[in-house]
Image: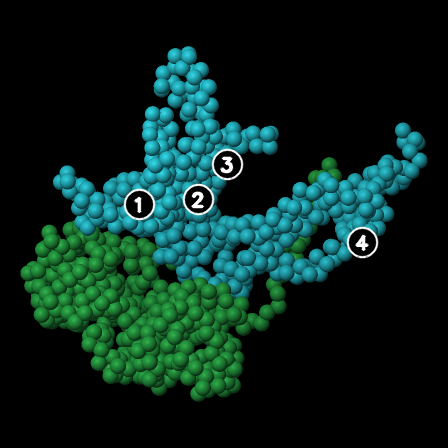
Chain colours: A green, B cyan
Amino acid sequence: MLKKYLSIFAMVLLLIGVLAACAPDREESGGSTDDSGGGDSEEATGDQPESLSVWVNDNEDQKVVLETLFEKYTEETGIEIDVTPMNMLDQIEALNLDGPAGNGPDLFFQPHDRIGNIVLQGLASPIDLGEAEGTYSETAIDAVTYDGEIYGAPLVVETYGTFYNKDLVEEAPATMDELMAIAEEQTDAASDQYGFLMEAANFYFSYPFFGANGAYVFNNEGGSYDVEDIGLNNEGAVAGGELIQSWYQNGYIPVEINPDIMNGLFTDGKVGVAITGPWNIPAYEEALGESLGTAILPTVDGTNATSFVGVKSWMVSDFSENKEAATDLALFLTNEENSTAYFEGAGELPANQAALEGEAVTSNELIAPFAEQIQYGTPMPSTPEMQQVWDPINNALLFIAQGDDVQEVLDEAVQQIRDNIATAQQ
Amino acid sequence: MSTANPTAKKNHNPKLAVILSILLAGLGQLYNRRYVKGTLFIILEVSFILTLGQFINYGIWGIMTLGTLAGTDHSVFLLIYGLVSLVLIAFAVTLYIANVKDAKRDAIRLRDGEKVPTFKEALRNVWDTGFPYFFVTPGLVMLVFIVVLPLLFTIALAFTDYTQYNQPPRNLLSWIGFENFGRLFFGTGAGDSNIWQDTFISVFTWTVVWTVVATTLQIALGLFLALLVNDPRIKFKRLIRTILILPWAVPAFVTILVFAAMFNDRFGAINTEVLAMFDLAIPWLQDPFWTRIALIMIQTWLGFPFVFALFTGILQSISKDWYEAADVDGASRMQKFRNITLPHVLYATAPLLIMQYAGNFNNFNIIYLFNEGGPAVRGQNAGGTDILISWVFDLTFELNQYSMAAAITLILGLIVTGFAFFQFRRTRSFKEEGNI
């Protein structure tokens, strides 16, 4: 009997506790973060902070060169830089929790295709590049622009291009027809000899052949993407899909190709031309030595192939109390001199236009074509919806490789992208 | 009887003691004239309220509302604070109930004139009877915070609307009840496409088939080989045993990656070297059916050494007398196996075998490393060999449907728990626990 009373009493006690629970007193300052995602705290007006906290990618080469740049900055301004190495891809999750708790960085480093997601979470502030805006390559600025605002100071651009083995192919193919001729002539699948190889079932690499024909992922007008307008099953896309399908049907590229196999064959000297990224240069060069050549992508029906461009940029945390100083540091790191130094140390192409056209880049025969290809490229869409594109379109490419009807497969893929976007937004 | 006890205090009222101790922990004890104990309880309660009261208040508010100011309140933090508060309240309520019970017990003793132990005696009493509990408590508290709390967090997430488009700190989460589960099971609220329901059913059925077939095969193979090696006529036992254990010695992820390369349709050794002899080429990675077959074979390869080692041990412990007796009765080989060997082996190993099933049910490694759940299937959101756990992984990292992923995880957890729980209860090895 008594036990029953007790438990009832305990419940009542709990309920009282629950009902009494009330909101803590807080300043009603959060409202402004709703739309612009930043700028609610009073920024230090001209006051120089003693130190800035920066999250850098935990790559050894990158860390070393950044360390020297930070030292230079400290010498010039007296601001100490507090560096935390953290994998680029883990930074967002950490910032989501550390930022509001006050342990976040002032500046962090991100690939541009995650900007949409970052803005959705309200983690970054738009930054004012000021006069420096014109010093970056146009593609890089387009890439870091989201909903009309610039969210990062671009440091690195990257895209892919053509690699060729000079022993097998005298000159890089300038047009698709030349490339097809090489493929026709040299491919002998029975002896694992290929004229032309690429990961054609990976949308990242095969986008140029869609884009050159007039396909697009999301229509971009004035710096913002219209995710309702998907151009992956239009006429250009089908033409691109059929072009890719022909490679498989003619037996130029085996369906089972994957990066490991492709790299293995290329370094064994069994591939004439391969399309892949500059990150393969060290391995390829080691294997082929002088015989390795690079070039921009071949033109498709007279149009330059529109490779996807990725941009990595410094972003200012929305939780930073030193946004001005952080922006200043970001501009310092990405100016011509320092991004050239970064290129020399870390081997990543500078987003700074002058640096991209500078001696350091152009004198490097293997790298220079990639710098040239940048101007024909399109930035990967940075909207969060892009994440819903990869799987369906990659699957579609696989079906295309297996010989399914291109129009049908692309229609299906676009429908699935729409469904995925709708599902994600629920 | 009542008059026989001169120390009885008829007017001492247990009810009053209870009410007093409910009002404030320790008051009842003071009324019972247990001054030291009473003071301790009062100090405990007051300090609990003073130090944790505000936190709990904030936590409860947080878990109920998940924040009211977007951009200022961080729903995930609030959710965690709330859960911690609930745990703290649970601890406090337990102590409080102990306090009231104690007051009542002492009051009744006092009324009846029983000798109430002094504080020192009571302490010793508690020490003697509660000894095991003292040692369990720190571990238990740790367990609550590092196991139960994250579990509660996942469960809680399943009932929120945490997606890519609704993430803190910019946005606030809110409670949406069983909506996620409704979408999974009944396809409600999903607009024109039923991705969730369709995919869930196809993925779930494959998960079940995968679990049952792969695990049963590995157990059967393990048993078969153990029987063979255990046969007295076999020579070089040690060598054979070592060889059979080898697949276990190589880390699973290495084996899986090597197999993934070997099963490559055009370049892999299986098609180019082995099957080429028979003029065969099987699309191991392109056709869902063959990918499934390959996965089951690999899992059998990976899993049988453990079962084999387990069974070898058990087989050697079966007394020879049994078989001799059976021989005398003229039992056949099959009869001996069915009535002596099998019951013995299964009897001793059933719980471990059940864990094999549970482990395969959530065997993310092999599915993901072999072919990332591929190959793609037209018109379906998950790949041809995605099991529930690898599908959840995709959901979280591609569709960023955190709350939906939590809902599926919860279902997974319930299934595995259910099957472990009932089977454990039914196996004798656990029924006899504590009766040794």
Instruction: Give residue B209's position: percent from left, percent from top.
Output: 34, 37
Single out the mark in the foreground, 2 or 3: 3
Q: Earlier in the sequence, mark 2 or mark 3?
A: 2
Q: Residue at x 29, y 59 (%)?
A: A389
Chain identifier of the residue bearing label 3 in the image: B
Q: Residue at x 74, y 57 (%)?
A: B46
Place residue A357 in its image quadrant.
bottom left
Name the amino acid, label 2.
Leu
Q: Earlier in the sequence, mark 2 or mark 1?
A: 1
Q: Earlier in the sequence, mark 2 or mark 4?
A: 4
* Mark 2 residue element: helix
Tag 3 residue: B421
Q: Earlier in the sequence, mark 4 or mark 3?
A: 4
Q: Nearer the viewer, residue A202 or B321?
A: B321
Residue B435 to residue B176: above or below: above
Name the amino acid, label 4.
Thr
Name the amino acid, label 1.
Thr
Q: Residues within 10 Å of mark 3 (few under 14, many from 20)?
A: few
CA gap, disc 2 and disc 1: 17 Å
CA gap, disc 2 and disc 3: 14 Å
Chain identifier of the residue bearing label 4 in the image: B
- Residue B304 circle label: none
Q: Earlier in the sequence, mark 1 or mark 4?
A: 4
Tag 1 residue: B385
Quadrant that contains the C terminus of chain B = top right
Place residue A237 in its image quadrant.
bottom left
User: Residue A253 vs residue A130: left or right?
Assistant: left
Q: Residues within 10 Å of mark 4 (few under 14, many from 20)?
A: some
Q: Earlier in the sequence, mark 1 or mark 3?
A: 1
